[in-house]
Amino acid sequence: MKILGTGSALPKKVVTNDDLAQVMDTSDEWIKSRTGIEKRHIAVEETTTSMAVEAAKKAIEAAKISVLDIDLIICATVSSDYIFPTLACEVQAAVGAKRATAFDIGAGCSGFLFALATADAYFRTGRFHKALIMGAETLSKMMDWGDRSTCVLFGDGAGAAVVSAEENQLLSMVQGSDGESGMALKCDNRPVNNLYRQLGAQTYSYTEMNGSEVYKFAVRTVPTAISEALEQAKVPADDVKLYLLHQANRRIIEAVAKRLGQSLDKFPMNLQECGNISAASVPILLDKVCKDGMLQAGDKVVLAGFGAGLTWGACVLEW
Ligand code: COA
């Protein structure tokens, strides 16, 4: 498969750490020193669908293809506007990709890697040829704004890529899941409403995270997954031009760089501007490095995601 074009969208409203310090007991110093995050975009007028559609249109334009060539749309999200129809079907309608088969996948912050792997697997059947893959999230609507240890970390946005079955840019793919540790990062679905199953008053919570468990999981699992992906691709770590990691926390990225023996300069970041946007963070960062002209033909690039599930994914691309 080959990435033909990328696009992204962020909400207009920017909320700084100082803005948060005015409404909860936190500080710019605490958030920045522990995470690297300085601000995040929060959807006020935008929705998950509107941002996904904006990112998709930009990716289709960058790919220079007809929208009718798209035969597959996969949206990775944990915060779609509807339980059904899926976000992917809403995007299909908005961009006019009438020939596409469209569905969502939920893999937390690994979502874009899982979408890429799924598109690649579909291409290998020979029945699909051009896919629009995306990560889109409005995490702000699922935060417990009374839980300062979690709500300060996240932001909203969408990223998209058009990928084609032609050529072989994807040199390797590693994915994994650890459901047994899944409750370290969770968000309840809506309360049960069933005429035949009366549960009385139900407790209902928004995003809850055991931060130190997730931190330990990330610094243990991500370097291993990347090393496996490099080994499969027969690409030495030193030969990689850029490592594009899920943007959760600067300290996690620093730990991964150290474990791989690589300079932090090879790990571009936008978490300082955007916070953690779950499935959207990797494609938004990919779009940024493409727009900034940081990738040339032949460059080796690693993408890696990790998060709720718990799940992880890493791949090596040759640009
Ligand atoms: N502002 C000020 N103080 C805060 C705070 C905030 N926003 N959030 C928590 N604190 C306080 C805690 O209450 C605690 O106070 P106490 O010692 O009096 O109880 C203190 O800061 C230290 O908290 P601790 O949890 O030990 O901090 P930490 O150094 O482990 O950092 C995280 C916390 C969440 C930043 C860190 O665990 C982390 O980054 N985990 C990974 C999370 C992640 O990236 N998840 C998504 C993956 S997809």
Image (cartoon, rainbow, N blue to C red):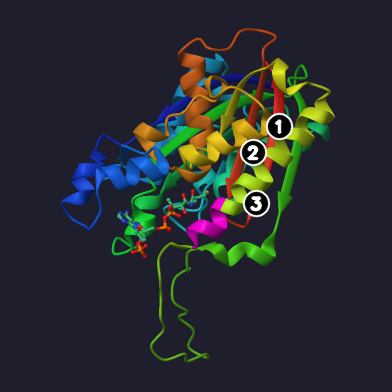
Task: Kindly identify which residue carries mark 1.
Answer: 315
Q: Label 2 crowding class (10 Å Cα cut-off): few <14, some 14-19, many 20+?
A: many
Residue 63 painted magenta:
no
The answer to whether residue 21 is above or below residue 210 is above
Residue sitting at 54 percent across and 34 percent down? 254
N-term mark: 1 or 2: 2
Residue 216 shows up from this direction: yes
Evaluate if marks 3 and 1 touch, with contact meaning CB atoms under 8 Å apart: no
Depth check: 130 or 290 in front? 290
Residue stretch rendered in magenta on the structure? 210-215
Task: Kindly identify which residue carries mark 3.
Answer: 311
Depth check: 190 or 297 in front? 297
Percent position of residue 174, x then y: 75, 39
Tag on residue 113? Answer: 2
Residue sitting at 51 percent across and 57 percent down? 212
Q: CA distance from mark 3 to mark 1?
A: 14 Å
Residue sitting at 43 percent across and 62 percent down? 207
Q: Amino acid at mark 3?
A: Thr
Percent position of residue 150, x then y: 39, 56
Instruction: Look at discs 3 and 2 and give the one toward the viewer.
Output: 3
Evaluate if marks 1 and 2 touch, with contact meaning CB atoms under 8 Å apart: yes
Residue sitting at 60 percent across and 40 percent down? 305
The secondary structure type at the circle numbered 2 is helix
